[in-house]
Amino acid sequence: MKKDIHPDYHMIEVKLTDGSTFQVRSTWGKEGDSMSLDIDPSVHPAWTGGSAKLMDTGGRVSKFKNKYAGLGF
């Protein structure tokens, strides 16, 4: 393999929506950084089988609805 072409592979901390954390090796960020998830497997309906609704954290859905409200959908 060629030297010095691969990204740095290190430990980061992942924080789930319920506040629990775990450590994983990743190329994201720097050693010791913390990644916070907005949607994670412990609450996402695809993994839980429930019918939970996703929250519109960025306001994109409401922006879209306001923009195209008069088209008769």
Image: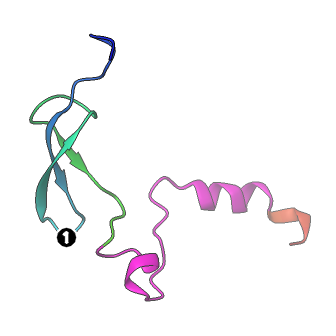
| Left or right: 32 as drawn, with respect to 36 | left
Q: Which of the 4 image quadrants contains residue 62?
A: bottom right
Query: Which residue is pictured at 69% across the width and 56% down the height?
Result: 64
| Left or right: 18 as drawn, with respect to 46 | left
Query: Which residue is pictured at 49% across the width and 63% down the height?
Result: 56
Q: For the N terminus, which image quadrant?
A: top left
| Left or right: 19 as drawn, with respect to 1 | left
Residue 12, horizontal then vertical, whole percent: 15, 41
Does 21 sit above or below residue 30?
below
- Helix, strand or loop for disc 1: loop
Q: Residue furthest bottom?
A: 50
Residue 4, horizontal then vertical, whole percent: 27, 10
**10 or 20: nearer the eye?**
10
Q: Residue furthest right?
A: 72
Confirm whether the magenta stretch covers residue 67: yes
Confirm whether the magenta stretch covers residue 53: yes
Q: Residue furthest front?
A: 1
Q: For the C terminus, which image quadrant?
A: bottom right
Residue 41, horizontal then vertical, whole percent: 33, 70
Residue beneath label 1, please? 18
Does 7 sit above or below residue 58?
above
Residue 55, horizontal then vertical, whole percent: 45, 68
Task: Find the magenta span and give its range.
Answer: 42-68
